[in-house]
Image (cartoon, rainbow, N blue to C red):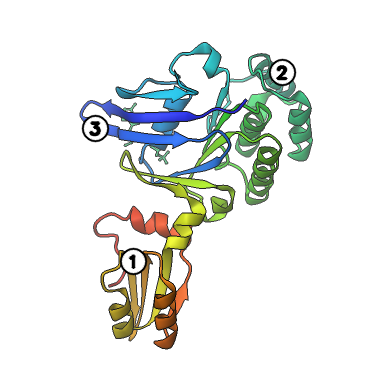
Amino acid sequence: MTADIVIDQVSVKYKKFHALDRVSLKLDGEKIYGLIGRNGAGKTTLLSLLASFAKPDEGSIQMNGQPLFENAELMQRVTCVYEKALNDESEKVKTYLEAIAEYKPDYDTDYAMELVELFHLPLNKPVYKLSKGMQSVLNAIIGLASRSPITIFDETYSGMDAPTRELFYQQVLEDHARYPRTMILSTHLVSEMDYLFEEAVILHKGKVLLHEPVDAVLEKGASITGAAELVDEFVAGMHQIHTQKLGGTKSVMVIDPLTEEQLVRAAQSGLEIGPVSLQDLFIHLTKEEGQHGAK
Ligand SMILES: Nc1ncnc2c1ncn2[C@@H]1O[C@H](COP(=O)(O)OP(=O)(O)OP(=O)(O)O)[C@@H](O)[C@H]1O
């Protein structure tokens, strides 16, 4: 089973503050989404709604055409793991995983055990005695092995060391290829995770700033570097998101797809055209006043 999610004009307010402000998104059943945003952008708030931990103040969320909130049948198909301390969990890892399997209809015990071995998770240790990174691993295993049509990882991996995160990313890709489903991974680790995402959603101050296929976003962006006056002439009228100047050389980042004719003109003028990463776009699109680079 795969599941589509339609988020329609959803707002969450804390007194007068909008943690989410009329957010609308359509998530297809078989993609890996990167949910990207700065601290406090609203990522956890949005994911909590998808997990039915909370109800929106306005708007609606539907899964396969039915309202999601507190729908027991649909909620069984959503797994949301987040970076929570498991310091009150005294049962052994093995018992903890068995208890999860009880209420997850798509849970694959064999795969969970494969992951336990891969990540060297000690099955007989009480959960509270696991290190922070190992607790993250346990959460990640639950997320992967639950094989839920909607699988959400809310920064679950931030406690893992780099080699462990790499193993986790491989499992995300491999298991998603075997069992396509909606996976949403929220992160600030954009440069290390961008290759996982088919679509990127950038949340900023409670609003959707961008929701596009990652390939399309990257194709639109370019950095143009060369003699300052030639660069200025070239980028005039384009959507510029960042400028850096060093002596007489200037580099400008634009989000405007360049035409063949522009590429030829750039080459003739000795301008260098480089790619723009998702991380570059994230940083520069969500920059606050006073955080701009050198002009
Ligand atoms: N219970 C609450 N009461 C008041 N404000 C809240 C509450 N929960 C969240 N907020 C505010 O809502 C905004 C969004 O928070 P949220 O946790 O969704 O952000 P986030 O994108 O997940 O951030 P981070 O990357 O730092 O975890 C923040 O400004 C936060 O302070």
Neighbourhood count class around disc 3 (C-alpha, 10 Å): few under 14, some 14–19, many 20 upward: few
CA distance for labels 2 and 3: 41 Å
Please report the residue visible at 37 percent of the width from the left and 68 percent of the height from the top.
253
Residue 59 or residue 144, whichever sits in front: 59
Closer to the observer: label 1 or label 2? Answer: 1
Query: Crowdedness of circle 1 by 10 Å Cα count: few (<14), some, many (20+)?
Result: many
**Please, which residue is most extreme toward the front here?**
261
Marks 2/3 in contact by CB < 8 Å: the verdict is no
Observer able to see residue 247: no
Residue tagged 2: 98
As drawn, the label of residue 242 is 1
Q: Amino acid at mark 1?
A: His
Is residue 91 placed above or below 17 in the rendered structure?
Answer: above
- Count the labels in the image: 3
Residue designated by label 3:
17
Residue at 43% across / 77% down in the picture?
263
Residue at mark 3: C-beta within 8 A of ligand 1:
yes
The residue under label 2 is which amino acid type? Glu
Name the residue furthest left.
16
- Helix or strand or loop: what does disc 1 sit on? strand
User: What label does residue 220 carry, if any?
Assistant: none
Which sits earlier in the primary sequence, circle 1 or circle 3? 3
Quick one: label 2 or label 3, which is nearer the N terminus?
Answer: 3
Q: Quadrant of the C terminus?
A: bottom left
The quadrant of the rendering that contains the N terminus is top right
Residue 18: percent from left, percent from top: 26, 33
Spatial separation of the CA atoms under disc 1 and disc 3: 29 Å
